[in-house]
Amino acid sequence: AQRVTQPEKLLSVFKGAPVELKCNYSYSGSPELFWYVQYSRQRLQLLLRHISRESIKGFTADLNKGETSFHLKKPFAQEEDSAMYYCALERGSSNTGKLIFGQGTTLQVKP
Amino acid sequence: GAGVSQTPSNKVTEKGKYVELRCDPISGHTALYWYRQSLGQGPEFLIYFQGTGAADDSGLPNDRFFAVRPEGSVSTLKIQRTERGDSAVYLCASSSGSSGRKQFFGPGTRLTVL
């Protein structure tokens, strides 16, 4: 079965420090991977997806099929990055767009 | 333009009662999804509509849960004989396509079953 694991419930860093939010997945095919973010009192929104190979708000994520990982990284954290981050997987063979989410990691950036 | 809207924002009901949760997707979005998010967990897929039809309802936990989208726009999630374990935030999302597309989420409906 497909599964997404985010091993850290909480990640606390100081402003300006590097950030890495871990995401591992279990899926034998070719997945589509996403990072969604939820800021305080806002709705869940897409941050980035691996097929776009983009950098959004300074965040990047590389799909590593060998390690089945899709870690989210940012070299210098900002206080406004504090939020809940969810990694999500869509089966590559899927034609539904159905997402499987991890449990989420709360990122706390301290001043 | 307006995003995905959900009503009510909060619903408190008693065990055994029937509830309906409504989702208004972004205009023109053909794909609509329902997810359920329990405390401390990520969203969990319930059902996917493409147009008026439920293309994938594999996430519905049992036959007490049912959803419709009769005109291919607004959707209603219906829960019969509610149980305390149904308490969660119910999220709706829509997208312009299906596979690989960005999903736009609503604010959710927080359901509490006493």
Image: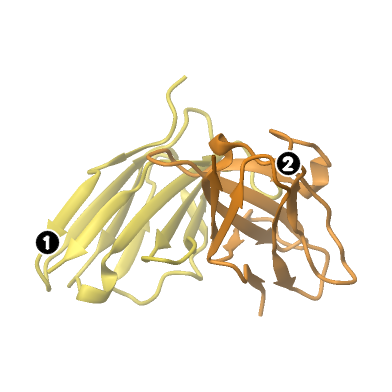
Residue A11 drawn at (x, y percent):
58, 59
Structural crowding at the residue carrying mark 2, measured as other residues with C-alpha within 10 Å and reported as few (<14), some (14–19) or many (≥20): some
Residue found at the very far bottom of the displayed protein: A1
Colour yellow, chain: B
Q: Residue at x 35, y 42 (%)?
A: B23
Residue found at the very far right of the displayed protein: A66
- Camera-side residue: A11 or A63? A11
- Camera-side residue: A21 or A11? A11
Residue B96 drawn at (x, y percent):
60, 36
Mark carried by residue A36? none
Which of the 4 image quadrants contains residue A91? bottom right
**Residue that carries the numbered disc 1 in the rendered image:** B13
Q: Name the amino acid type tagged 1.
A: Thr
**Residue that carries the numbered disc 2 in the rendered image:** A59
Can residue B53 be seen at all in this image of the molecule? yes
Q: Are marks 2 and 1 in contact (CB under 8 Å)?
A: no
Assign a secondary structure to mark 1: strand
Q: Name the amino acid type tagged 2.
A: Phe
In the rendered image of the structure, the colour used to display chain A is: orange
Q: Are marks 2 and 1 on the same chain?
A: no
Can residue B51 be seen at all in this image of the molecule? no
Image-based side of B77 in relation to A89, left or right: left
Q: Residue at x 26, y 66 (%)?
A: B87
Instruction: Examine the rendered structure and indicate whether residue B92 appears above or below residue B14.
Output: above
Quarter of the image with the C terminus of chain B in it? bottom left
Assign a secondary structure to mark 2: loop
Q: Residue at x 51, y 46 (%)?
A: A83
Which chain is home to disc 1?
Answer: B
